Image: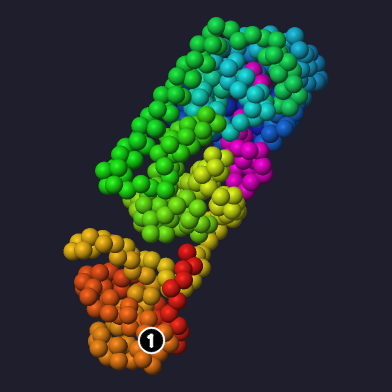
Amino acid sequence: MSTQPDDEFGDGYSRDHDDAEARNRAASPLSEDLAEELRRIAEENKAIRVNLSLSAALSRIPNVWLEAICQANCVCPASGRRSGRAARVAALVAHLTEPVALRQCVLTLSPRARVALRCLIHSGGWMHLAELAREFGSTDGDGWSWHQRPPTSCLGELRCRGLVFIGRSSLTREGRAGRRMFKVAVVPRDLRNLLRMIFEKLPVCHEEELVLAQMASKHEQAIQEALSHLDDYYDVYNFLNWQPPLEREDAEDFVRHLSQSGFDPELAQAGVEIFLSFVTVRRHEVQSLDDFCGYHLSELVSQFVEEHYDERWSLERRRSSAQCVCWLYERLFERGRILKETRDEVRSACARLLSGKRKLNLIRRPPPLGGEPIFIRVNPNTGEEERYTFNHQRLLMVWAGAFHHDWRAMLSVCDTVPSGAQKKALIHELTALEPDICDLLLSQADAEDFYRAILWFYEDRLLELSAW
C-alpha cells in the first residue's frame, strides 16, 4: 500500500488516509464537522500578502478549495499530462481575468455578496476580516470540503468563486506595517481594476439597495444604543454635580464619527467610558483635556484597568483602548477642543506603547516635586475643598518613621532643616487631620518612600511646584 501523497491532492494526504477519514466521518459526523472546521481555521491563519496576484492566491489554497472554485466558475482545464493543479490555476486565472467572464461571475453572486465585494473594492481591495464580518457575517460553519459542500456564508460565497482570499497580515487598518498579525480578506490585485470598472457600469440593483438599507438601519441602531449607554454615564455625572473635562457633545460626536468610519459603536462607546472613568479618578490631575499626558495613557491601560475592572485584560484589549484614546484626541483636535501639543503628545505616547511586540512599552511619570496633589476631599465640617500633596505625605512619613508619631518633637526640629517654616506650617495642618486620612496617605507609601522622605526632610527644600 503506497503512502506517498497523490499528485491530484498535493497536500500530504494519501488516498488511504482519505478512506480512513471517510470511515471516521460515517462513524462520527459531528466530530468530522469539527475537524473540518478546525482545518479551515488553520488555513485562514496562514500569512497572506494584501497585494498578491490571483495566480499566487490560487496556488496557496488547498486542492479541495481549488476544485470547488473550478466547479463554481464552470472551469474545466484541458485533459492530458498538464491537467493537474497548475493547469487548474492557469485556467481559472485566464477565466477570471477575462472581463466578460468576470462580469458574469459578479452577476451570479447573491445581492449580499455583491455588496460585500463592492465594499472590499471601495476599501482598496482588502479589509480587516473583523470589520467585514461585522457587516456581512463570519465564515463560521463553512467547513473544509467545499467541492462537496460549498460554503454558505456571504464571504464564503465570494471565496468559492475565487474572488476573495483570507489570511493573516501585519498591516494595520490604515495600511501601515505593524508588529501584530490581523486576519484580512483580500481581492487579488489583478482583479481589482476589472471589478472596479464592472461596478462603475453595473447599477446597484433593488435587492442590493435593500441589503444596504438593512445594513444602514442595523448600524444606526447600534450607534443609538451606544449613545444611549453613554447618556447614562453622563446622567450619573449630572446627579453628582460634576462635569468631566470631556463634554457630552464631544463624546457623542466621537462615537458617531468612529462608528461611521467602520468601527464597532459598542467598542467606541466602551473606549470613551474607560477614558471617563480614568479622568474621574484622576480629576485632581486631569482637570482639562489638555492636562492628559503620555504617562496618563500608559497608566490607563496598565494599572488603572487592573485596579478598577474585575476581569483580566488581554494585551490586545489594552492596545485597543490606547488606540481608541489616541483617536479620541485626534478628533478633539479636529474640533478645536485641545492644543496641537496635547494631540502630538498623546499620539507619540500611543505609538510608544504599541511598539512592543509582546508587551506594552509603559511610560513612567516624572518624579514628584512635592506640590502634586494625591488626595482631595471636601471637609464635612467647613464644606471647603482640602488638597493634600506629596509634601503632606512626606511629612506624615517622617512623623511616623523618624519621630514615632510625636508632632511636638518634629516641630522642634523644623528650625534646623531647610524650608523649616514652610514645613512647620504644613505640619500644623496635619495635626488637625483625622487619623483615618493620615492612615490613607501613609498606606500609599512603601519602605523606600519612608527612607527618601526622611532624607528630604533633613536635607532638601520644600517645593510647591508640580511635575504633573
Residue 46 visible in the shown view: no
Quarter of the picture containing the N terminus is top right
Is 140 left, or right, of 444 in this rendering?
right
Q: Residue at x 36, y 46 (%)?
A: 243
Is residue 316 covered in magenta? no
Name the element at disc 1.
Answer: helix
Q: Where is mark 1, residue-wise?
A: 420
Q: Residue furthest top?
A: 206
Is residue 177 covered in magenta? yes
Q: Nearer the viewer, residue 306 or 381?
A: 381
Which secondary structure class fits the magenta region best? Answer: strand
Q: Residue at x 58, y 17 (%)?
A: 115
Height in image: 127 above or below 377?
Answer: above
How far from the left and from the top, in percent, is residue 323? 53, 46
Is 442 left, or right, of 211 in this rendering?
left
Q: Residue furthest left?
A: 381
Question: Which amino acid, by three-letter code, is at mark 1?
Answer: Gly
Q: Nearer the viewer, residue 165 or 195?
A: 195
Height in image: 296 above or below 207?
Answer: below
How far from the left and from the top, in percent, is residue 280? 36, 52
Q: Residue at x 69, y 14 (%)?
A: 200
Q: Nearer the viewer, residue 272 or 415?
A: 415
How far from the left and from the top, in percent, is residue 307? 36, 57
How far from the left and from the top, in percent, is residue 81? 81, 20
Height in image: 319 above or below 228?
Answer: below
Task: Choose top left, top right, bottom left or bottom right for residue 203.
Answer: top right
Is 351 left, or right, of 293 in this rendering?
right
Is 377 left, or right, of 285 in this rendering?
left
Range shown magenta:
160-186
Q: Residue furthest right?
A: 81
Height in image: 427 above or below 236?
Answer: below
Q: Residue at x 22, y 60 (%)?
A: 383
